[in-house]
Amino acid sequence: MFRPVRPRTTSEEARDQIVEAIRSGDLQVGDRLPSERVLAAQIEISRPTLREAIRGLVEAGLIEVKPGPGGGMFVRSDVIPQAILTPESLRLGEVASVLEARRLLEPRVAQLASLYATEDDFETMQRTIELQRETQDDWQRFSQLGEQFHLGLARATRNWAVVELMRILLRMLAMARQTVADDKPDTAWAIDIHERTLAAVKSGDPAEIEIVMEEHVGFLERVWEERSGRTRLRRIPDFLVAPDERAGPVRQG
């Protein structure tokens, strides 16, 4: 029912908001942040508190402050150092709930995106995949790009509530991966499944999207079973299984 309280300062809260904007791709390398006065007003903190937050981001190599005319605060890097992330974890028994929530949400997000996505959305997601292909040796960067791909799908739905739900789910999935996976996944497979997910969304075929998303969400579920030694806590209902999977044996979830 209760969880440990982790005291956080106002500057840490401000820092984490900026970090999340960079991590999700809302802020990209070279982007200029609002002025100190404007940003402090937006977050509703004092300017000295904001300076403290920015100082930490500068030390982490994420933000660069340029003085003089034309200067300001700019995003220097979009690779988030592990040390700057607020430590979060899941209990082992909570992972299955996150995976079940993912199975409910992500396939529907992809199907909704197929109705409203534009060519710009497709180009953005394809560019993210290409960046993943270039950064396979940098797992942290590769993982962040994977999150951006899924946020790109959510943004393509043109539904702000879906985007916020996806942000929450991605944070939980990151914690779930830390809990059950102690090695790096097959980056080639991850790129391939993103390519096939994007192709299915472009096709606009709900059944095709369902099939590829079954493989997509099923991967971490299998890792969970193998690493935890537990079967999935509840049976996967037929309406959450891709059509070509329904004739197979009943799987316990």
Image (cartoon, grey):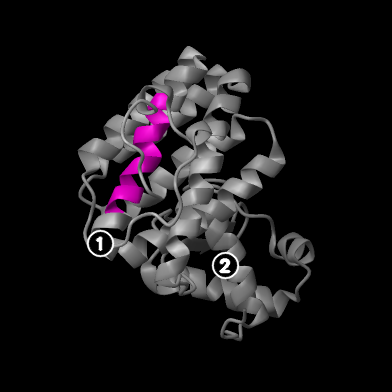
222 falls in the magenta region: yes
Asked whether 69 or 229 is in front, the reply is 229
Which is more N-terminal, label 1 or label 2? 2
Place of residue 234 in the rendered image (x, y in percent of width and height, measured from the top left): 46, 52
Q: Which residue is mark 1?
A: 227
Res 145 → quadrant = top left
- The residue shown at (58%, 37%) is 154
Tally of numbered discs:
2
Residue 167: tell me if it is visible. Answer: yes
Magenta residue span: 211-223
Place of residue 224 in the rendered image (x, y in percent of width and height, measured from the top left): 32, 57
- Residue 10's place in the image compared with 206, above or below, is below
Residue 24: tell me if it is visible. Answer: no
Q: Which residue is mark 2?
A: 16
Place of residue 182 in the rendered image (x, y in percent of width and height, measured from the top left): 24, 64
- Residue 165's place in the image compared with 176, above or below, is above
Tag nearer the camera, 2 or 1 = 1
